Amino acid sequence: MMVLALVVGGLLLTFLYGAIIGRKAKALTARAAKAPGFRTTTATSTAEYQFSPALVWSVIRPAEAAIADGSDVAYAFTVPPIPDGPGERQCFFGRNGSVSMLEVLEEVPERLAVTQALFPPGDVSTKTVYRLEPTGMGCRLTLETIVETPDFMIANEAEMQRFGDSYLSSLESLLEKRSLEDARQ
């Protein structure tokens, strides 16, 4: 009788242990299967220029234009798109040795360009949309920066806004310079 009680007690303990371990395993599996969430932060800057859309496009669009825009870019070049493959890529080498690359996802000449940062790789995805609209006196350029980060990171929206505003502000002097150069030719 004592042996029977020990066997039944052992089986009962084994059953309880299995049930507890099974619940913990299911709870861990559910947590592990949950994909991390992402948050999207957007900053938009707009400026109007008394220059043609063609002139503005020539200053902002080619990768090589980054050398003259007052940034820290020392060398830039374009890798053409591959049919049925990746789109045009633009590569930039900074004066401090940094390297960055972006892909042109969409382009309508003198109207729209959408770029996606590819390098350096990281947890943050950055897409930039350049919208150029003709106006009665010239054109309007809207720069929209869209940053997607994992839930545990927060993009600095104020810094994104400052960058966009600063870029558009510095573009004015580049446009004036390019306009004067074109007039001399």
Image (cartoon, grey):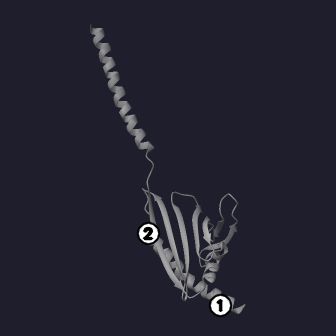
Q: Between residue 88 and residue 98, name the one nearer to us.
A: 88
Secondary structure of the residue carrying numbered label 1: helix
Q: Are marks 1 and 2 in contact (CB under 8 Å)?
A: no
Is residue 18 toward the left or the right of residue 59 in the image?
A: left
Is residue 110 toward the left or the right of residue 41 in the image?
A: right
Q: At label 2, which amino acid type do we have? A: Glu
Q: Residue at x 27, y 9 (%)?
A: 2
Please determine whether, in this image, residue 141 is positioned above or below residue 96: below
Image-quadrant location for residue 172: bottom right
- The quadrant the N terminus occupies is top left
- The location of residue 173, given as percent across then percent down, is 58, 86
Residue on which disc 1 sits:
180
- The location of residue 8, given as percent across then percent down, is 30, 15
> Are there few (<14), some (14-19), or many (20+) residues within 10 Å of tag 1?
few
Residue on which disc 2 sits:
157
Q: Residue at x 44, y 43 (%)?
A: 32
1 or 2: tag closer to the N-terminus: 2
The single residue placed furthest to the bottom in the displayed view is 184
Please determine whether, in this image, residue 149 is positioned above or below residue 92: above
Is residue 167 toward the left or the right of residue 3 in the image?
A: right
- Label at residue 125: none
* Cα distance in 3D space between marks 1 and 2: 35 Å
Q: Is residue 123 visible?
A: yes
- The location of residue 129, given as percent across then percent down, is 54, 70
Image-quadrant location for residue 13: top left
